[in-house]
Every structure is written in C-alpha cells, then in structure tokens.
Image (cartoon, helix red, strand yellow):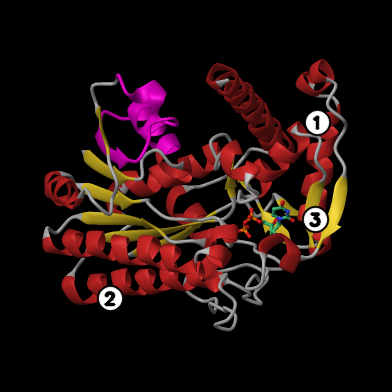
Amino acid sequence: MKVLILGVNGFIGSHLVGRILRDTDWEVFGLDLGTNKVEEHLGNPRFHFVEGDVTISKEWIEYHIKKCDVVLPLVAIATPKVYVTDPLRVFELDFEENLRVVRQCVKYKKRVVFPSTSEVYGMCPDAEFDEHESPLVTGPIPMNRWIYSTSKQLLDRVIWAYGFQHGLKFTLFRPFNWMGPKLDSLNTAKEGSSRLVTQFSWNLFNGEPLNLVDGGTARRCFIDVEDAMDGLMAVLRNEGGQADGQIFNIGNPANDYSVREIAEMMIAIWKDHPFRKERGIPEGRMVETGSGEFYGKGYQDVARRTPSIKRMQQTFGFAPKVSMQDSLRKAIDFFVEEHKALEKVVETEN
Ligand code: UDP
C-alpha cells in the first residue's frame, strides 16, 4: 500500500511513519516544512520525504494523491493559544488547504483518513462523547477559540457528504488529548503557546511556575501516543473495510484527570528526576492564572472531555493500556533530551 502523509513531521505524522515502517511493508510519501521529528526514518528506502509547504507544493500534492492509495491530510494548527491569537490562519490552513486535498481525493477516487478532533464536541453535556449521538456544542462568535472546532466540524460534514453523494471512501478519527514525545516542541512552549504537557515540561525545566488556567479544574482524558497509534493503525489497515464511512474517537477514558492533578503528578515526577537534581533546578510549583490573562480575550474552556471508545473497541478490539504516570514519565524524559539538544544549539550559535 502507498500512503501519502501531508504534515508527516508533526506529532501524529512522525509517530505514524515510525509505526508504518516498523510494522508493515507499506511505502510512505511525506511532505512537511521540516524534518526534525522524522530524522531517524529519512534513510529508509520506503520513506519518500519532500521538504515543502502544503500551501505552495500543490502540484506535488496532486501528483501524489493520484499515485497513492490512502491520503492523510494531517497539516493543521492544533494549539488553543493560536486559535485565539490567529483564528484566520487556523481557518485557512485547517479548512481551506485540506478542503482542496479532500476534493482531489474525490476526483481521483482515493481513500482519505482525516484527523477530526475531540474539539468538535466542544461543551457537549454528555458524560461520554459518542460519534453518532452527541451534540456538537460551541460558543459565541467573539470567542475565537471555536474557529478550530468549527473548521474541523465543517470539513467532517463535507467529507461525510462527499461519501454520501459521491461515494468517497473515508474515515474520520478524533484524537482525545494524545500525548507523548514530539507533542509540539519546547520552542513553542517558550512562547507559551504549547499544549499542556509540553508547556508544563518547559515551565519545570526553567524553574517557572505551572499556570493553572482558571484554577486548573478543567478535565481531560489523556492517551499515550503509542496506544493511540495502535488505534490509528487499525483504522489504516481497514481489514474487511470496517473503517469505511466511519467516525472513531481515539482516546483513553481511564486517564481522566484535572489540569491540577496533572500538574501535581508532573511536579512529583520532576522532584525525583535526575536531571533536576544534577542541575539544581528548583522543585515545581503552581500558580492560578485567569484564562483572559493566559490566552487573551476570545478563549473559552472545555470543562470536561471524555470519549466513548465503544466503536473502536467493538470494531478493532481497541484497548489502551498505558497509565498516565508512565506516559508522563516518558514524555518528561523525552523533553529533557530535547532541552539538552536545544542548549547545545544555543551554545554553538554563541
Ligand atoms: N492549560 C493550563 N495551563 C497551561 C496550558 C494549558 O491550565 O499552561 C489548560 C487549558 O486551559 C485546558 C487544558 O489545560 O483547560 C488543556 O489544554 P491544551 O492546550 O493541552 O489543549 P485542549 O485539551 O484544551 O485542546
């Protein structure tokens, strides 16, 4: 099978290409702006990488859609800080660029596996979010945060409609707070625009307090990226066509924690971490911050977000295993190594 991954150097793309090369005989064609997360695979003869920008490399993309069997348009901005500060860029990249790709999949009759998002459920009141039953609840227009959710939701609907009216073969998958190595980067955390675990890691390494936005009462269910990859690979394998025309939540309802609890767990791991002790970096601490101050006007939080994974369980026997503690430990160890590498770059530049 030939797989086209647009945005292969992102968090999901980089883990996915690793899994594909390790577990299958498939070929991967990948496009991205950089290579830092896929460096280790560049020498693999089944990985064909091209450095480029999806907004510019249009001919390359169309040619490869024609050539491949399945297309994953993974290019997107997926960090809440940017939804608030640059909503138009989110719309243009996440919606407009991907719509073009989806239309070419229709034209060339190619299967598309599209990353929807748990954000589409927004402030849904259901205890567990169900792909076919739960309402999708977003906030008022002045709240920029919802541009990501609604851009993704509209594309979900467009893909569904292309399936309904033109026979497009598709699967929508919805990541629920996937976490692990390579989630964002410490450079984005430096600007304060990273997702939770990366942001907190940066704060800990720099002796800064962890910001509990609005008291840290918001809850999320986190899934280790390795568990998430088991789910995504089952979707991609699509044995017996079971994933066709389907929507799947991929998350771990067992790892349900508040932001404050995550901060406490990370502070406890950090307290005993050899890197902290070696460098004499202070132990972690927390401060409460208002969301207006942290994200700016236009932010509205999701109080809780729990997936129903019934469909993944029934279809593929999906069963996430990694505990929050183990996942956090692994992520922190990874970011420590990234931190050391960044320090070396700064030393060389000086
Ligand atoms: N958050 C926080 N401090 C930070 C970063 C995030 O309290 O330094 C909170 C944020 O307000 C939200 C949760 O952590 O309630 C998860 O945020 P994330 O950016 O990981 O993405 P989301 O799950 O909202 O898409």
Assess whether mark 1 and mark 3 are in contact (beta carbons under 8 angstroms). Answer: no
Q: Which residue is mark 3?
A: 212
Q: Quadrant of the C terminus?
A: top right
Q: Which residue is mark 1?
A: 270
**What are the residue bounds of the magenta stretch?**
14-43
Camera-nearest residue between 140 and 152: 140
Three-letter code for the amino acid on which mark 2 is drawn? Ala
Assess whether mark 2 and mark 3 are in contact (beta carbons under 8 angstroms). Answer: no
Q: Is 157 placed left or right of 80 in the picture?
A: left
Camera-nearest residue between 322 and 70: 70
Q: Residue at x 46, y 73 (%)?
A: 150
Camera-nearest residue between 253 and 206: 206
Q: Residue at x 85, y 57 (%)?
A: 288
Kindly state the secondary structure of the residue where label 1 is placed: helix
Upstream in sequence: badge 2 or badge 1: 2
Relative height, residue 32 to residue 177 (above, below)? above
Relative height, residue 285 to residue 347 (above, below)? below
